[in-house]
C-alpha cells in the first residue's frame, strides 16, 4: 500500500481541506508509506504572483506539518523540485484523449464563461495529476469527493498506456475517501463548497483563524429556525443544518446519527456553541503550531528539499519505464 496525495498552493488551508483531505492524510501515516506534496505546478494554471506563490508554498508546508503530517515519516515535498512530474505529464499527453478531457467538470467550473481565455494548463491539469499519482505507483489516493472524476481519468490513462504499450508500467490507483466529511459546504450557502476562492471570508474557517473568529463564524453561519431533527433523512432538505451536523460529526469521529441522537430537538442556539467549542478545541493546537512554523522559512525549505530528494529517487524508475515503453531514447542515468 502506497498512499499519495497533493494539495494546491493557492492560499491557506481551510476546514474543508482539513476534514475532506488532511485529516485522512494524517491517519494514513500509521498504516502505509505516504507521499504528500504541494501542487505548485498545478497552481500556475491560473495566474499567481510569483512572490506570493513562493510564500504560499512554504505556508502550506507549515500548515500540513501543523495539522499532523510528520516529515520524518512521510515524504513531504513540492512538485516543482521533482521534474519527473512535468516530464511524465508530457508523456501521458500522448495517451489522454481530448474526449476524456472534455468531460472534466472541474475544468468547466474553473474556466467559467470565458473558456477561450483559460490557460491550456488548466485544461490539461488532470493529466499532470495523473502523472503525480502514476509516477509513484500509488495504490491509494486520499482526496475529497470533488476529485473523484480526476481519479477515474488517471485510471483510464493508466489502463490505456499499459494496454497500448503492452507492459504494466503503471499501478492502478484507488481513490480513498475516509470516514470523515468528504464535502464541507460554505457557512453562508449550504449548496456551495467551502472554498478558498469564495470572496466572503465568513463562508469558511481557515486553519489560521483565531478562536474568536472561529466562534464568530459559527455564530453567524446561515441556518434555519427549526430544531435539529432526529433522522438523517429529515436533514436532506436542510443543507445548512446538514453541513453543520456533518462538520460536528467528522470533528468528533461520529456518524450523523450519533450527533442527532445527542442534539435532536435542540435549536441552533444550543448546537452552534457546542460546535464552536469543538472547532476551537480541535483547531487551537494546529493554529498555534502553524503560527510558530510559518516563521521558520529556512527549516521549511530544508524539509521540502529532503522530501524532494526522496521523491526524485522513488519517481525515477517509473519515469524511465515510461520513456522506454514509448521507445524514446532518454537519459537513463540522470542524477536523482
Ligand atoms: P484544493 O484546495 O482544491 O487543492 O483541495 C485540496 C484537498 O481538499 C482536495 O483533496 C479536495 O478534495 C479537498 N477539499 C477542498 N475543499 C473541500 C471541501 N469544501 N470539502 C471537502 N474537501 C475539500
Ligand atoms: N487536484 C487536486 C485538488 O485540487 C490536487 C492534486 C494535484 C492532487 N495532484 C494530485 C490530489 C494528485 C491527489 C493526487 O485538490
Image (cartoon, rainbow, N blue to C red):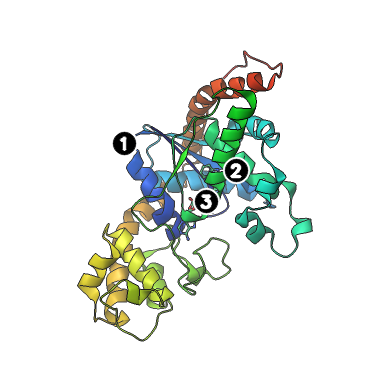
Residue at 69%, 33% (x, y): give it: 90
Give the label, 2 or 1, closer to the camera: 1
Residue at 60%, 29% (x, y): give it: 163
Q: Respond yes or no on whether mark 3 lies under 8 Å from ligand 1.
A: yes
Q: N-terminal of the two: label 2 or label 1?
A: 1
Locate residue 91, reporting x and y percent. Answer: 68, 30
Residue at 26%, 67% (x, y): give it: 257
Q: Secondary structure at mark 3?
A: helix
Viewer-proximal residue among 87 and 202: 87
Q: Residue furthest top?
A: 333
Q: N-terminal of the two: label 2 or label 3?
A: 2
Distance in Å between CA atoms under marks 2 and 3: 17 Å
Q: Which residue is mark 1?
A: 31
Distance in Å between CA atoms under marks 3 and 1: 22 Å
47 left or right of 5 in image: right
Q: Compared with residue 277, is residue 24 higher up or lower down, i.e. above or below?
A: above
Q: Residue furthest bottom?
A: 225
Q: N-terminal of the two: label 3 or label 1?
A: 1
Q: Which numbered tag is attached to residue 328?
A: none
Q: Secondary structure at mark 2?
A: helix
222 left or right of 97 in image: left
Q: Compared with residue 29, is residue 10 higher up or lower down, i.e. above or below?
A: below
Q: Which residue is mark 3?
A: 147
Q: Which numbered tag is attached to residue 40?
A: 2
Distance in Å between CA atoms under marks 2 and 1: 27 Å
Locate residue 176, reporting x and y percent. Answer: 41, 45
- Residue 210 seen by the camera: yes
Query: Circle 1: is it few (<14), some (14-19), or many (20+) Cα within 10 Å?
Result: few
Examine the image and state in which quarter residue 187 appears. Answer: bottom left
Residue at 48%, 75% (x, y): give it: 188
Viewer-proximal residue among 19 and 91: 91
Quarter of the image with the C terminus in it: top right
Amino acid at each position: 500500500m502506497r498512499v499519495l496525495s497533493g494539495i494546491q498552493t493557492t492560499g491557506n488551508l481551510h476546514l474543508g481541506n482539513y476534514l475532506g483531505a488532511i485529516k485522512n492524510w494524517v491517519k494514513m501515516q500509521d498504516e502505509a508509506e505516504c507521499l504528500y506534496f504541494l501542487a505548485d505546478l498545478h497552481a500556475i494554471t491560473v495566474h499567481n504572483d510569483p512572490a506570493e506563490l513562493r510564500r504560499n508554498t512554504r505556508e502550506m508546508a507549515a500548515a500540513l506539518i501543523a495539522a499532523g503530517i510528520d516529515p520524518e515519516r512521510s515524504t513531504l515535498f513540492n512538485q516543482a523540485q521533482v521534474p519527473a512530474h512535468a516530464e511524465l505529464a508530457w508523456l501521458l499527453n500522448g495517451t489522454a484523449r481530448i474526449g476524456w478531457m472534455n468531460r472534466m467538470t472541474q475544468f468547466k467550473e474553473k474556466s467559467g464563461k470565458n473558456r477561450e481565455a483559460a490557460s491550456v494548463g488548466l485544461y490539461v491539469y488532470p493529466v499532470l495529476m495523473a502523472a503525480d499519482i502514476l509516477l509513484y505507483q500509488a495504490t491509494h489516493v486520499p482526496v475529497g469527493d470533488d476529485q473523484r472524476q480526476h481519479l477515474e481519468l488517471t485510471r483510464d490513462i493508466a489502463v490505456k498506456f499499459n494496454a497500448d504499450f503492452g507492459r504494466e508500467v503503471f499501478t492502478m490507483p484507488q481513490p480513498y475517501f475516509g470516514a470523515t466529511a468528504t464535502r464541507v459546504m460554505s457557512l453562508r450557502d449550504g449548496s456551495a463548497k467551502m472554498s478558498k476562492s469564495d470572496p466572503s471570508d465568513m463562508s469558511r474557517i481557515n486553519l489560521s483563524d483565531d478562536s474568536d473568529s472561529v466562534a464568530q463564524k459559527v455564530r453567524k453561519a446561515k441556518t434555519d429556525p427549526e430544531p435539529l431533527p432526529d433522522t438523517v433523512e429529515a436533514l436532506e432538505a436542510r443543507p445548512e443544518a446538514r453541513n453543520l451536523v456533518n462538520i460536528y460529526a467528522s470533528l468528533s469521529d461520529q456518524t450523523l446519527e450519533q450527533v442527532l441522537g445527542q442534539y435532536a430537538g435542540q435549536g441552533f442556539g444550543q448546537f452552534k456553541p457546542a460546535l464552536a467549542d469543538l472547532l476551537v478545541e480541535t483547531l487551537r493546537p494546529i493554529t498555534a503550531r502553524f503560527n510558530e512554523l510559518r516563521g521558520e522559512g529556512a527549516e521549511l525549505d530544508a524539509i521540502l528539499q529532503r522530501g524532494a530528494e526522496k521523491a526524485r529517487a522513488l519517481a525515477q524508475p517509473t519515469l524511465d519505464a515510461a520513456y522506454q515503453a514509448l521507445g524514446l531514447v532518454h537519459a537513463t542515468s540522470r542524477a536523482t
